[in-house]
Amino acid sequence: MRADKHPYVSFLALLPALILFCWVGYSSPGFDDEYYTINWVTGAESPAILIGFVDNLDVHPPGSYLIVWSLRELGLSFSEMRLLAGGLSAFALWVLWRHTLSTTPLAQAVGYLLICVNPTLLLWGATLRWYSWSMPLIVLLFLLVRGGFRNAWAHWGAFGVLVVVLAYIGYFNLLFVPGLLGYALWQRRDRLAR
């Protein structure tokens, strides 16, 4: 049964990915890099102190640490934060899969396995580290590039804001920008020529 012809099949495909990502996030005891995040977040009484820790002790920008610090201030435990990150990642990957559906059921199934229940993306998407917070934004940037706003100022403004936020979360995210910028320019080539 094809997911593009039957929306309920597509929606039902979200549930296993969502359950898997959330369960892995919530039940994870954490890993070595997360302990840096936990130590700095629990030791910082303010965002300014946290940014000072990160600037002096880490190669990553402070965005992901500020997200975790803010969620902790809202009362979430680290397990609940991983659950939230896992849920956001699963939803973003499912949206990506929906927007890249192929025409054959086999290709849709393989795409689902490679995108929505990929073990590497699962481990990256349900943590306290920067890649968990980056994944939904990279998918959002991809969707913006594929469709975007009709108004050029809104389109390129949104593109710029997403790039800045991604850079503030993790410098590695900037590797996606040239390809997506090239794709965005190619998608809008007729409008740009005018």
Image (cartoon, rainbow, N blue to C red):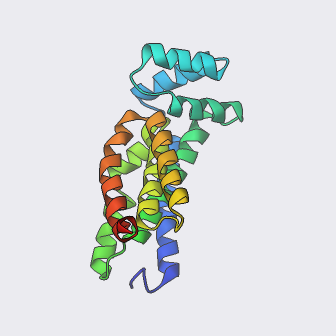
x then y, percent, for residue 84: 58, 47
Note whether 192 is above or below 34 in the view shown.
Answer: below
Q: Nearer the viewer, residue 34 or 157?
A: 157
Quadrant (top left/top right/bottom left/bottom right) for the N terminus: bottom left
x then y, percent, for residue 127: 47, 39
x then y, percent, for residue 17: 46, 60
Q: Residue at point 66% right, 20% down?
A: 46
Q: Residue at point 48% right, 54% down?
A: 156
Note whether 8 is above or below 122 in the view shown.
Answer: below
Note whether 129 is above or below 49 in the view shown.
Answer: below
Can residue 26 be seen here? The reply is: no
Q: Nearer the viewer, residue 3 or 176?
A: 176
Q: Residue at point 34% right, 54% down?
A: 180
Can residue 103 be seen here? The reply is: yes
Name which quarter of the figure residue 110 lies in: bottom left
Q: Residue at point 40% right, 61% down?
A: 116
Q: Nearer the viewer, residue 49 or 30?
A: 49
Name which quarter of the figure residue 134 lies in: top left
Note whether 69 is above or below 140 in the view shown.
Answer: above
The answer to whether residue 134 is left or right of residue 43 is left
Q: Residue furthest front?
A: 194
Quadrant (top left/top right/bottom left/bottom right) for the C terminus: bottom left
Name which quarter of the figure residue 183 lies in: bottom left
x then y, percent, for residue 15: 52, 65
Q: Nearer the viewer, residue 22 or 158?
A: 158
